[in-house]
Image: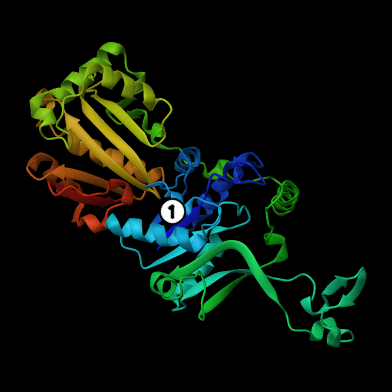
Amino acid sequence: MIAIIPARGGSKRIPGKNIRPFLGHPVIEYSIRAALQSGCFERVMVSTDSEEIAAVARKCGAWVPFLRSEATSNDYATTADVVTEVLQRLQEQGVRCDSFAVIYATAPFLTAETLRRGAALLDAGRAAAFTCVEYSYPVQRSLLIEDDCVRMAEPQYLTTRSQDLQKHYHDAGQCYFSTVDAFRKCGSLWGPDTAPILLSDLEVQDIDTPVDWQLAELKYRLLHPEGPDFAKSEPQGLKALEGPLRAFLLTPYEKLSDSMSERMRQGRNLPEIRNRMTDRDEIPADSHRSFVASLADRTDKAYFAVQYSYGPETEPETVGSVTLSDLGSGDLERGIWIFPESQGNGYARALMALLYARLAELGYKHVYTRVRRDNDASRNLDLYMGAVEIEPARLPGAMLPADPDMVYYRYDL
């Protein structure tokens, strides 16, 4: 199951609505965090036409594999149009999906537990489900104003007791679950076999105007007097790996001296190293400097120089490099290379054992690698660590399209 969070950039009534701060955090972050924390989804993706929204979404941990087409970025495109495009694009990338949940970007009251309830309904065999809330006043008592006069829309209910009237509900506008088969059959997010996910009135607030926004913040504070509890669950990210790891020391590329940074570039460009890499091209000095400078502001990638110390009285030996890319939803892609003079000493195996244990502590779930078929050393390292070879169809979308010259592995932390 995947989560799809539509977030178009052209909001008219509330400019920048989908990433506007809601009690100090981009409002889309509430939806992304609820989806990630629910544990229901293999991927949590954002569908947007905006590079700015995409950058915010990635920083919050979501996956943005592509930008929307023009056809789904205008004022007339429906949510069903967006879902249709997403499913088609993912299929083209080899990503299989049997069910999905659409989660609105402006749903700060959505919780991980609500999402688990929706997923459980699909697991129980229902075709679809979405959040609903009871009308706060009996709709049978609704009024019409015509010619400046008030009259009942349904006068037959004038004397009926409120408790005897049938309850009516409306869409809460938070999340919509569906199997792919059901969606394709009816072309809608709900059909004949749609189950309700009932919410209380306090958990629901339309956010269409600036006044709605203020009301939502007031209501959120009523539910959460201490504000959003993001600090406790704030991911430490890949930067948290900096520093000692037993006898190893990991130093981010952007914190290396110019001479050490150049040494890492030259080491990576050695024929015996780069010919085993997924990208065999040499890296020019200016490209290397530009890339290293960009790493300081990135949370999705981390490149570390690896040193090993034999004891407090010895100078640490620079043995190689390890690279990590955050793919979202707890998934990482990992790379490693060891200087030729340091190979054969077991550094890679020892480092991976410590690194994987640390990544598990930081809350990551899977480590993926792509290895050239003729790179026996890296393939043996993955097998030694207990990684399993997987088909390209099981890769995270950020690693697609697959390369037939590569073998892919996954390690479960």
Q: Residue at x 17, y 25 (%)?
A: 268
Is residue 80 shown left or right of residue 167?
Answer: left
Q: Is residue 315 visible?
A: no
Q: Coloring scheme of the render?
A: rainbow
* Rendered location of residue 336, percent (x, y): 21, 34
Residue drawn where x is 40% and y is 57% of the image: 86
Q: What residue is shown with label 1? A: 44
Residue 57 is situated, as x and y percent measured from the top left of the image, at 48, 43
Mark 1 crowdedness (10 Å alpha carbons): few <14, some 14-19, many ≥20: many
Residue at 55%, 47% in the rendered image: 28
Residue 158 screen position, x and y as percent: 88, 84
Rendering quarter of residue 149: bottom right
Residue 242 in the image: above or below residue 34: above
> Looking at the image, which is closer to me, 269 or 322?
269
> Which quadrant of the structure image shows residue 179?
bottom left
Circle 1: residue type? Val
